[in-house]
Image (cartoon, grey):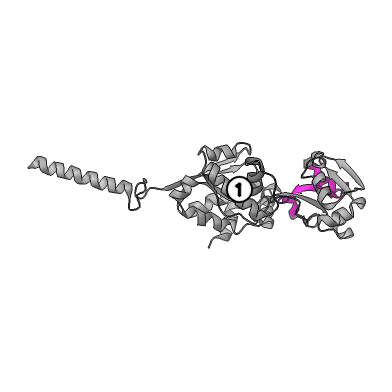
Amino acid sequence: MKKAIRKMLALTLTAVTTLGLTGCGGSTASVGETKSVVVGSKDFTENEIIAEIYALALEDAGFKVDRKMNIAGSVVHTSITSNEIDIYPEYTGTGLITILGMDAMTDQDEVYRTVKDAYNEQFDITWLDYAEANDGQGLFISRKASDEYGITNISQLQANADKLRFCSQGEFDEREDGIPGLTKLYGDFNWKSSRIYDNGLKWEVIENDEADCAPAYTTEARLTETDKFVLLEDDKGMWPPYNLAPIVRNEVLKQYPEIEEILNTVSATLDTETVTQLNAKVDIEGEEYEDVAAEYFESIKD
């Protein structure tokens, strides 16, 4: 009789343990187990800030987040496809041109649909909603020249090029998405002068009135100094969009579908001006990217 009771108790314990492991929805996670994800970033200020905002949003929703920041751009894609990280901020143009090796497109919705479909099929990765923030190629001009000649877009720049000194970085004169491509779309740029400078000196060169115009990326920190510099509108759509978006491994998204809403809510708050200002807090004001991300996340919380 005692043996029978012990056997019955053992069977009951086994059943309870199994129920605890499977849970109501059939998940392999234990009841009450902490939800855990790995968030990564590329190795530059903007990507670190955005990745940290993602991490804070997930933590606020009850996730345990491991961080793997500062991953070289050349290997970050491998990091997510090899399951070393689960989520990181990517750019639609990078996905299209660098990862997929496709030709450039200029419609942001078309670029997004293309990378979303291809990543899902080829890499088992989902692109969540893209932000309006666009970290793409651009041209800027000194505030002085902009005001003097009424230049706010690239068509007006082309029409007044003979009055302007171009601050070249050398390769921009040769790249298809540089002067050659601009010339095909906008017409010849007959600069008053064009000299080659190190890319890191472009802001100083223009601020010191040694040149008037130079290439830049559209979220560079010093573009917040609007009393000195004006980012020109690409009014004919020369450059492909590089919209920010979270990308997530499908396996993780299936396990935690709530991630989609959490990160889409973050993306909806990010436009180009906002991201540029966040970059400036780190690159100009010297704040730590973690502090900048924390301050921003607090500002957007419900």
- Asked if the stretch drawn in magenta spans residue 84, the answer is no
Is residue 241 at all visible to an observer of this figure?
yes
- Image point 54% across, 45% down: which residue? 121
Given the current orientation, which residue lies at the most extreme left position?
1
Crowding near pointer 1: few (<14 within 10 Å), some, many (20+)? many
Element under label 1?
Answer: helix
Name the amino acid type tagged 1: Val
- Image point 19% across, 44% down: which residue? 11
Q: Position of residue 206 (x, y in %)?
A: 84, 48
- Image point 64% across, 45% down: which residue? 96
- Asked if the stretch drawn in magenta spans residue 215, the answer is yes
- Image point 46% across, 45% down: which residue? 251
Label 1 belongs to which residue? 115
Is residue 67 at all visible to an observer of this figure?
no
Left or right: where does residue 225 sit relative to residue 189? left
Choose between 277 and 173: the one closer to the eye: 173
Given the current orientation, which residue lies at the most extreme bottom position?
302
Q: Position of residue 30 (x, y in %)?
A: 35, 46
Choose between 66 and 286: the one closer to the eye: 66
Count of numbered circles in the view: 1
Q: Where does the magenta region start and end?
A: 200-223
Which quarter of the rendering shows the N terminus? top left
Left or right: where does residue 239 sit relative to residue 266? right
Q: Position of residue 273 (x, y in %)?
A: 69, 57
Q: In terms of image quadrants, where is residue 45? A: top right
Q: Position of residue 3 (x, y in %)?
A: 10, 40
